[in-house]
Image: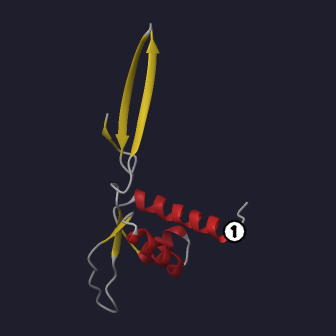
Amino acid sequence: MINNTSEIKQLNQEKIREIMLQHEQFTKAEIAQETGLSVATCSTILNEMAQSREIIKTEPIKASVGRPAYQFVYNVNYQHVLIVALRFDGGVTSADYAVADGAGRMIRH
C-alpha cells in the first residue's frame, strides 16, 4: 500500500527506469505513453534524473511542426553493481567477483 507522495514518486521513477532500460532512447511523450504517466509527471522525473546524470538528454530531434523534441537515454554507467562470492572448499578460501553496469550487463568477471 502506498502511503505518501515520496513512495508514488519512487514507483514512477522505477516505471521510467524499466522502460528506458528496455529500449535505446525515448522522448518525454513516448515515455508517458509507455508508462501511462502524464507528460508533466514524466517531464519532472526526467529532469531530475538528467540532473543527477542517471539519464542523458540527447540533441533535439527536428520536428516539421512545433518545438523540437529531446530524446533521453539511460546512462548505464550511472551505477555499477559488485557481486562477490566467497567459497570455502577443503580448507581453501577463494573469492570470485563480477561487476555489472546499470543495465545489468556484466562488464567484468
Image point (28%, 80%), residue name: 60
Q: Residue at x 37, y 65 (%)?
A: 55
Q: Quadrant of the N terminus?
A: bottom right
Q: Residue 92, located in which quarter of the rendered image?
A: top left
Residue 62 x/y as whole percent: 26, 84
| Circle 1 residue | 4
Whole-percent x and y of residue 57?
Answer: 33, 72
Q: Is residue 83 left or right of residue 59?
A: right
Looking at the image, which residue is at 44% across and 8% down?
A: 91
Q: Where in the figure is residue 19, as x and y percent of width and height? A: 46, 62
- In percent of width and height, residue 15 lies at 53, 63
* Towards the viewer: 86 or 75: 86
Disc 1 crowd rating (10 Å Cα; few below 14, some 14-19, many 20+) is few
Which residue appears at 38% of the width and 48% of the height? 80
Q: How many marks?
A: 1
Quarter of the image for residue 77 reads bottom left
Classify mark 1: helix, strand or loop: loop
Q: How is the image coloured?
A: secondary structure
Furthest toward the top, the residue is 90
Q: Quadrant of the C terminus?
A: top left
- List the single residue furthest toward the bottom: 66
